[in-house]
Amino acid sequence: MSKEHLEAVRASVEAYRRGDYVAASAYLASDVIWEVGQELPANGPAAVRELWKRWDSEWDELETVAEELIDAGDHVVVVMHYRGRGRGSGVEVDDLQFEVHTFREGECVRKAEYPTRAEALEAAGFRGSYRR
């Protein structure tokens, strides 16, 4: 099933980049918990879509690129590159986040962000064994 998980995450990222939040959230379970480092988790696909809409409204430009997707069985590790400029502040951001998408029965039940690649890989079950 892991190939399907990779494809689901890839399709979600592409739909998000197009602004199609409904398609981007199609792989989410009804009880998904969407955790991001800077705020409280969103619970459920509708809350995730609202979070995305709010974020996108706060940026003059925002580029979101999944630079790498790593198959970890019931998890997908994503190296996500964010570049943008804040609408109100003008502050430029160029940052990597390391996400772990956890699947159950073909749906994403949790997405969590980690500050380092090592932490994300460990959360996905790799214990020093992953090599690019």
Image: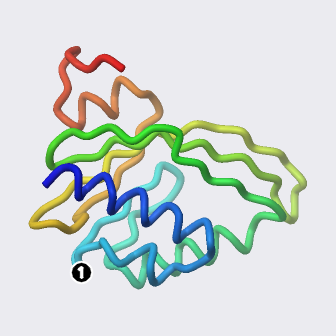
Q: Write the residue at 20% across / 26% down.
A: 126
Q: Is residue 117 left or right of residue 51?
A: left
Quarter location, residue 25: bottom left
Residue 16 in picture, x, y percent from top left? 55, 69
Residue 51 in picture, x, y percent from top left? 53, 73
Quarter location, residue 68: top left
Secondary structure type for disc 1: strand
Q: Nearer the viewer, residue 15 or 89?
A: 15
Mark count: 1
Residue type highlighted by circle 1 = Ser
**The N terminus - image quarter:** bottom left
Identify the residue under disc 1. 30
Q: Is residue 10 above or below residue 113?
A: below
Q: Nearer the viewer, residue 128 or 38?
A: 128
Q: Nearer the viewer, residue 101 or 92?
A: 101
Q: Is residue 79 above or below residue 26?
A: above
Q: Write the residue at 24% across / 28% down.
A: 122
Residue 101 in picture, x, y percent from top left? 30, 52
Q: Residues within 10 Å of mark 1 (few under 14, many from 20)?
A: some
Q: Is residue 47 left or right of residue 122?
A: right
Residue 74 in picture, x, y percent from top left? 15, 49
Q: Write the residue at 74% across / 68% down.
A: 58
Q: Write the residue at 23% across / 15% down.
A: 128
In the image as oriented, which residue stretches furthest toward the left? 105
The structure's colour scheme is rainbow
**The C terminus - image quarter:** top left
